[in-house]
Amino acid sequence: MMKKKVLFVASECTPFAKTGGLADVIGSLPPVLNQLDDIETRVILPLYRSILTNWRKQLVKVTSFDVSVGWRKQPTSLYIMRFDQVTYYFIENEYYFSRDDVYGYEDDGERFVYFCEAVISSLPYMNFQPNIIHAHDWQASLSLLFNKVYSNTPKMKSVLTIHNLKYQGIMLRESYHDLFRLDDEHIAGMEWHGLLNCLKAGIYHADKITTVSPTYAEEIKTPYYGEGLFKCLQDRSKDLSGILNGIDTKSYHPKTDQSIRFKYQYSSSRKRLNKLYIQHKFQMEIDPDKPMYVMITRFVEQKGLHLIERILDQFLSEEDVQFIVLGTGEYHFEHFFYQMEQQHKGKMIAYLQFNEKLARQLYAAGDFFVMPSKFEPCGLAQLIALQYNAVPIVRETGGLKDTIVPYNEYTHAGNGFSFSHYNAHDLLAVLRYSLTIFKDQDKWYPLFRNVTKSSFSWELSRDQYVKIYDQILGVGPSNVRSDKTWQV
Ligand code: ADP
């Protein structure tokens, strides 16, 4: 079998730049793929200002060249760095990437058109000829289009992984002639309700499409979860599959994690020392038996925060619990959690930051991890929670459904709590139920034991990716698209 040379194209990756779970995946999957003899994975990323600042010494410049973005010529430098068994490339352009944040700019569409152009333009300088290009999310999707249509580049087989269908990279239709250098024939795979849709282009051009859990792979073919692209995904159904994410179980391990105060493994009494540490840190009542609920999340509707809004005040008023939220995002939710903290002083903490170290301390401190998502492609936070033995409380959707089995107090099977309908009072009921289990040692300990045994490392999922790579290298072109479906 031919050696597989895979180029990951992505917009974030730990430890360089992170806004969410995508970064964890891009940081942890390539090292485990590279443990196999017949595969080499490299990763290409934008060189954001923070990466240049923090990694300047390790970065080596390969070359400089110009990249076309429509009529513009953008000066570009390609950098290389070896880190943790993986070779990383970085695309530098001051105008697009030397900014404070990773995303959230008016010209995000243009920034990632540029990035994808730059990825393809970098190929001759890499000293590495990938036979597979593996794009992640909308920011990388256009690299699959450019791979296909530019005649002067070596053609690679292609995979698109959708980490979150909600974010699609929508641009005005007029951008097509402004930002692209393509004939009109290529617009069909990209046009969407009179606009341009980067993710749609990826779905159209990829040989294989994966998403990050089997349940989400089914859900996104329905109108409710399909974010306006469900028909296109139905059309590509034969090439679409769900592969569950793993986590880096070395980095996220309570026995060795340098961020946490009291290291532990399997021991609930040692874990509770971390709870005492957090109670002390936030001036909460110090009591190892007080149930502590934790949320660590982006503040967006997806994460089920409207449900929390409806019931948190009642839950905190009626129950003797502690609740800590770590997150940032939409102002509306930040304000809500701040208000809750004011109203429930000592019981409720809202820490409105992105803070990796505190996140790890909270996973270690919490008895419960609350994640009532409206939809959840895979979800890593619940997997990290399991790893630190915080019992997940989730809504049965996407990857949450595939990883959390509701606890059965009679058979003692299960590793968490769950509810099905997107309904605040169903969430409240399951929160209350979790409390009754917590208070009953005969029921709590079997659950805790199950949680300590749940682990989602990458090994299983890695083999599924390898299988897909083998399939696309071994066969001809992927399924034909039925053109009618794509005209939306
Ligand atoms: P998503 O990618 O949709 O944000 P995931 O559950 O897949 O959700 O991944 C979220 C990741 O981001 C986890 O590693 C989680 O610990 C981390 N995270 C989210 N919010 C914060 C925060 N405020 N501070 C630190 N880490 C955070």
Image (cartoon, helix red, strand yellow):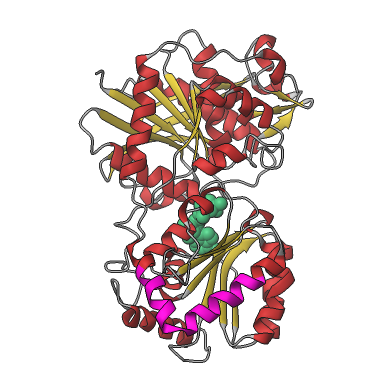
- Residue 153 is left or right of residue 176, and the answer is left
Q: How many marks?
A: 0
Q: Say if the magenta span includes residue 455.
A: no
- Residue 253 is left or right of residue 397, and the answer is left
- Screen quadrant of the C terminus: top right
Work out whether residue 60 or residue 127 is closer to the camera in this orientation and state it: 127
Q: Quadrant of residue 72?
A: top right
Seen at 43% across and 77% down, the residue is: 444
The magenta region covers 428-449
- Screen quadrant of the N terminus: top left
Looking at the picture, how far across and down is residue 346, in whole percent?
A: 59, 88
The answer to whether residue 95 shows anywhere in this view is: no
Looking at the picture, how far across and down is residue 465, in whole percent?
A: 38, 33
The residue at the far left in this view is: 37
Looking at the picture, how far across and down is residue 122, in whole percent?
A: 42, 23
The answer to whether residue 167 shows anywhere in this view is: yes
Q: Quadrant of residue 198?
A: top right
Seen at 43% across and 31% down, the residue is: 77
When the figure is inspected, residue 152 is found, relative to residue 52, above or below; the finding is above
